[in-house]
Image (cartoon, grey):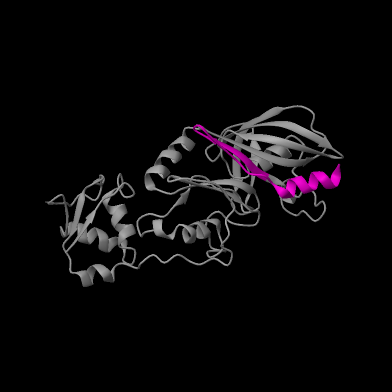
Amino acid sequence: MRKIEITKNESEQRLDRFLLKYFNDTTRSNIYKLIRKKVFKINGKRITDEQYFLQENDVLEIFLSEESIEAMIKPFVPVKPEKIGLDIVYEDDELLVLNKPKGLLTHPDKSEYKNTLATMVHFYLKDLCTNTFRPAPVHRLDKNTSGVVIFAKTYEALKKFNALMRDRAVEKYYLCIVHGKLTKAGEVKGYLIKDEVANKVRIVSHDDDEAKYCHSKYKPIKTFGDYTLVEVELLTGRSHQIRASMQLIGHSIVGDYKYGGRKIDGHTNQLLHSYRIILEDKVFEAPSLEIETFISNHQ
């Protein structure tokens, strides 16, 4: 028999979801079978309701032998990435704020598991990682977009800041360099439709079943040569939203060939950088050496 005291990092989770994380080396059907067999007690009472929400200080008892328990658990071992260094903008007990470099995935996917920002964070914060919780990003950036990414270090913080994101209570600002001379501020409102096969989006004026509302504001900061440095405020966080918006107004981002941009000075990916996030009373900013260098070379 094993006892587990529920902490803040596990609270407010459904029992079945917690067990699926805790017993990470068994099947979903086996978890539900164990629940039906009444092998779990919470605060001394047998529990068969898989939708019970765990509360902080609950005591979960597992009435199985230690051998049976261990056979269903594969201990979390952080993967050591090839590059370990993180560009840390800010850190406290709740948050880790990073300046993500271009070319690095925020999350692992089918193409890359080892060398991602999340993998690097888990290695850096390995003492906070368990089978049931690992520090997680509150939002994400495309692989070839650089800039500020916020990781929550506790489950309580993750819930809190995810809620702020959903309520659009977080201000997100980007810098990009676009083709042409943009002289006026403006905004793009519309409905974004994604082509999953081409991994590309388009913005239309009408709503339909597959479209998602999107809204961006933009203003020129500096015009130099045949280019403009633009600040974009992202009011909805849709995939490729800024890139498609800039193409829509006739000022594609330099290097963004997928959305009408051209290769300049070897730039084959978008010159787009998340440079400022305002979260509650905190302002997080990160510079972009790539954008600064481009401006310097073309003035």
Q: Residue at x 18, y 69 (%)?
A: 65
Position of 183 relative to 143 (above/below):
above
- Residue 202 in percent (x, y) is at 65, 41
In the rendered structure, which segment of residues is drawn in magenta? 273-299
The picture quadrant where one finds residue 103 is: bottom right
Image side of residue 180 versus residue 169, left or right: right
Q: Nearer the viewer, residue 57 or 190?
A: 57
Quadrant where the N terminus lies? Answer: bottom left
The picture quadrant where one finds residue 41 is: bottom left
Position of 17 relative to 244 (above/below):
below
Q: Residue at x 16, y 60 (%)?
A: 37
**Taking the image as drawn, is residue 185 in sight?**
yes
Q: Residue at x 74, y 43 (%)?
A: 253
* In magenta segment, residue 281: yes
Q: Nearer the viewer, residue 47 or 276?
A: 276
Q: Residue at x 33, y 67 (%)?
A: 25
Image side of residue 169 versus residue 288, left or right: left
Quadrant where the C terminus lies? Answer: top right
Q: Nearer the viewer, residue 237 or 176?
A: 176
Q: Nearer the viewer, residue 76 or 50?
A: 76
